[in-house]
Image (spheres, grey):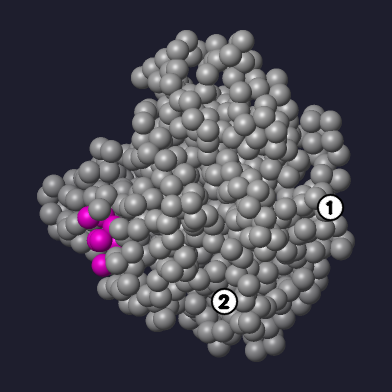
Amino acid sequence: MTAPRIENLTESIAVDAVSALGELEGAAFCARLARAGDDLVEALIALYGAQATPALLERVVGVALAGATARCPALRLRDRLREVDDDWYLGACQIGYATYVDRFCGTLAALPGHLDYLQELGVTYLHLMPLLRPREGESDGGYAVADYRELDPRLGTIADLEAVAAALHERGMNLCVDLVINHTAAEHAWARAAVAGDRRMRARYLTFPDRTVPDLYERTLPEVFPDTAPGSFTDEPAMGRVVWTTFNTWQWDLDYTSPDTFAAMFEEMVSVANRGVDVLRLDAVPFTWKVMGTDCQNQYGAHRLLQAFRALMRVTAPSVVFKAEAIVPAKLLLPYLGGHDAFRPECEIAYNNQLMVMLWSAAASRDANLMVRALRGVGTPPLGTTWVNYLRCHDDIGWAVSDDDAAAAGIDGAAHRRFLADFYADRFTGSHAKGVDFQHNPETGDVRTSGMAAALAGIDQARIDGDELALAGAIRRLVLLYSVVYAYGGIPLIWMGDEIALANDARWQDDPLHAADSRWINRPPMSWEVATRRSVSGSVEERVFSAMRRLGAARRSGDALRADATLAVLDSGNRHVLAFTRHHRRGQRLLALANFGDERQSVSDDLLRASGITSFVTVVSADGPVRVVDGRLTLDGLGYAWLAGA
Ligand code: GLC
């Protein structure tokens, strides 16, 4: 049997590429193929062994060429520009914003009318939550896709999406869109055909004749939604088979051990990218490859799959980058950015879940000690890749505190996880938080938390109590947390409404389709009426919004805030204070300080020397310029400061 070789394809593909794309672009296509070809072939052989045939290679390269040919002139130009500016997402100017279209402004057609608002906040990267046509009824917020080629009709049409992409691009902004590759809705045409007896379509899913094999897998499989969708398999009587359903019963896991599934999903991926998407947020990527006897997450095959997609997308649409949604233990994160024994291009961006968890942990305990250890354990993203840093998103918070990190910080992991779940669901005396539980698993004792950032930071409670002092503290806490998100290496991502301290959605349970899923408490409709108060001096909205704008402006102040500046988390010598430095090779240095304590705290000015800073200016802070007094730097309670120097 012959192994696939890019060289064997080159001649025939060169002819096809030139006839489809013209001489210049055809040659560019072939050059990209030659460049990414080894990565592609290596990944395909690792995934499919003898099934990685020349015919498979020809098929997927054919999809890439058709995809490249279908790109409109504006996107081809974007490809050319970003082949040069290939690490635009590392720029200090990048600020992200994530939102559901319907909750933000109703429809895609209305979205361009709100771009001034986003620009006022400094946003350059807009992540629109799932917008492809979902199944009817409950759809896991759109993560159960029935058709990748159509939009959710409630949001608009493909043409509306293209218009949004063009409007963003015109303003120098980027579009990020979700692509769910682990599963489709049970209502997707592939699944329907499988039920109707189409064997090829059935092979696209993981199905079993009975429960024997599923039961063996279940022995080591954790449950993702133990409350609402226990187990990972669903009986499908119409097909007479048991289907793998990691998430909900109507989300069918795809079988990527079949090369046909891989090739078919790549076609869907290209069709989405070609609407003008700059960043594909690849949903639930740890789950795509299953291995008996494991938790079926983060497997070797899941990484190889991403590498194969990565190589093909580079050939098709070089301006498109991948963002991995891998909410996994910290030590398993870097491989999603290509960090393996050798660097293998995978995703350019990944969610920094560990930072998010540690921010809430430090805010509850007023202590940055555990955070320092945990952040150091995550490691440094490979060159050319970065994090998206965030405080909240549309999902729950899983209390990812490792036992080892906890032990190193002198605390008990299980007890601390319990404390955090209790604290944020307001079951802990002295808690300021108004979150709610998500998916309590009595077997493991695991409880996760839902809630808007403002509610978790204490703003909702202080408003209910009419307590001005507590409110001022809670606002400081929210801004403090975002100050770390903005200063840490990567793209800061604002969750819709946090910029105006939007409260929990009090009516989240009114919709019967949402009532069992508490994550909807942190998916409120945007209130444009509340947003107008950002210009009312002294209002909560103005205090938060203007602070976020200041942080955004400060980010643009220098290269030390670029994602490729080196980051080091320091021992501040004061357990309440997080200190980290950023150093860019062009010379700029920055020391970021964040005091999680309620009282005034100081740290030694040795931290400046440890950061290589001899003289500094305060770029941004909670309370005006910071000065060295008697060899100490002082921050008020819940204060922060970024000190830039050389
Ligand atoms: C991701 C999404 C989450 C969804 C899950 C299944 O984790 O963020 O909202 O439930 O994937 O698609």
The residue under the point 84% across, 35% down is 411
Percent across and percent down for residue 73 are 17, 58
Which tag is nearer the camera, tag 2 or tag 1? 1
The residue under the point 64% across, 45% down is 473
| Badge count | 2
Q: Which of marks 2 and 1 is nearer the N terminus?
A: 2
Give the magenta part as a residue range.
163-170
Q: Is the magenta stretch mostly helix, strand or loop?
A: helix
Indicate whether 462 appears above or below 387.
below
The residue under the point 27% across, 50% down is 172
Q: Is residue 531 left or right of residue 211?
A: left
Residue to which mark 2 is pinned: 139
Q: Residue furthest left?
A: 23
Foreground pick, 265 / 542: 542
Q: In this view, does 379 lie to the left or right of 619?
A: right
Going by the numbered disc 2, the residue's amino acid type is Ser
Residue to which mark 1 is pinned: 429
Q: Can residue 420 be seen in this view?
A: yes
> Which element carries disc 2, helix, strand or loop?
loop
Percent across and percent down for residue 376 are 65, 29
Going by the numbered disc 1, the residue's amino acid type is Thr
166 drawn magenta: yes
Give the quadrant of the C terminus.
top left
164 drawn magenta: yes
